Amino acid sequence: MKTNAYDVIVVGAGPAGLTAAIYTSRARLKTLVLDEGMPGGQVKTTHKVSNYPGFPEDIKGTDLAMNFALQAERFGTRIARAIEITSFDLTSPLKRFELDEEEVVTAPAVILSTGAKPRPLGIPGEDNLRGKGLSYCATCDGAYFDGKDIHVIGGGNSAVEEALFLTQFANSVTILHQFDEFQAEPTTAHEALTHPKIKVLWSTEPRAFLGEGQIEAVRVQNLKSGQTEDLKTDGVFIFIGMKPRTDLLDGLVELAPGGYVPTDESMATTIPGVFAAGDIRVKRYRQITTAVADGTIAALAAQKFVKDSGMRVAVA
Amino acid sequence: MSAHVSEITMDQFDAEVLGANTPVVLDFYSTECPPCEALAPKFDAVADQFAGQVKFVKVHRQASRELAVRLNVTGSPTLVFFKGGKELGERLAGDIQRSAIKRAVEALVS
């Protein structure tokens, strides 16, 4: 298997990772960015971005994402697209990733900027019925439920906003929420509560998804009465927040509540030479601008780490 | 998109998929769909690898409602596998790994 040596390997090509790569490659560090898909992270599927400084007019998320990638590549970053990490070692001084079982890449410093994905409920039937009437993405799958009776799970901003979005397709949308009121902001909550197609079951939690090859019902429990019941459904959408993608750190780092990665002020994790940046990290606010800031700091810290390690590869 | 991937409309389905001489992988995708975006380059990569042996075809869900209903596809992305005009094997949906596509395609040609 061919082996390629780098100074810095960035995992995840969202705003945090691509910013880190802009900085490290400008510092003449040989930089590789790995992504399981195309560069851009969550930004590339954001309609329009209005709060990223430097763009007086709205910019399309996909254009902003592409610009980040082009800027990193201009300074020599290699972006490996659509790769799968088939094995890895993050704890040795020289970190190592095997890509698609066909290439090995190494570097003394790694920046993890793998972001977050929709959080699963972790109840029976969920894995089997995903894509078979069970979805985490209203824009992806809403149109499949034209004229259908569906359920939405959650009560925060995204759940209520997506429930409203889904009313343009579905015949009825029943929201299942564990509390007695929405956590969504009042205007959105009011709009949902007065919407003729939306019904809410309060103090209700899903316990299982039922169906053979296609979702047929959701088993729910009323938290006050303790009663369980199977509700017939054509589809279920789950919006209960995001889950950081920390698979690479399983068993290596003690994660904070919610599964986020603790770092110090320089974005260093507890593993020497491994930094974390962006939505994966413990922090208060998760924005494109804060991801970019994390990426900058992680890159500068990684740059110092590589220099001090004496393991820098010569740039040809 | 890879040169080894083609996009069809639903009225081409019978000829292009069921009537194909080779096994076919059909990808139902949607616009504004992060897992579909993530799948696209992996789908391309596996298509390049099996060029000539297996046909890789995409169909846009929003424009192909009746086909989705006919095949009972209710999520994007969904990969459906065909051989000799019949669906074969397990469908793949959601966050699909490149290695999972490869394994499914290998099973299809074996």
Image: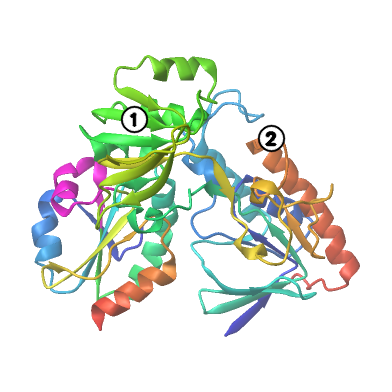
**In this rendering, does residue A40 appear at all?**
no
Q: Which mark is residue A174?
A: 1
Q: Is residue A41 left or right of residue A111?
A: left
Q: Residue at x 53, y 24 (%)?
A: A184
Q: Secondary structure at mark 2?
A: loop
Residue B69 included in the magenta stretch of the image: yes
Other-residue count near label 2 (Cα within 10 Å), few / some / many at <14 / 14–19 / ≥20 = few
Residue type beneath disc 1: Thr
**Viewer-closest of A307 and B108:** B108
**Viewer-closest of A211 and A53:** A211
x and y percentages locating residue A54 in the rendered image: 66, 29
Q: Is residue B62 left or right of residue A194?
A: left
Q: Are marks 1 and 2 on the same chain?
A: yes
Quadrant containing the N terminus of chain A in the rendered view: bottom right
Q: Are marks 1 and 2 in contact (CB under 8 Å)?
A: no
Q: CA distance from mark 1 to mark 2?
A: 30 Å
Q: Residue at x 25, y 57 (%)?
A: A213
Q: Which mark is residue A285?
A: 2
x and y percentages locating residue A238 in the rendered image: 43, 41
**In this rendering, does residue A199 appear at all?**
yes
Q: Is residue A190 above or below residue B54?
A: above
Residue type beneath disc 2: Tyr
x and y percentages locating residue A220 in the rendered image: 38, 41
* Residue interval drawn in magenta: B58-74
x and y percentages locating residue A193 in the rendered image: 40, 17
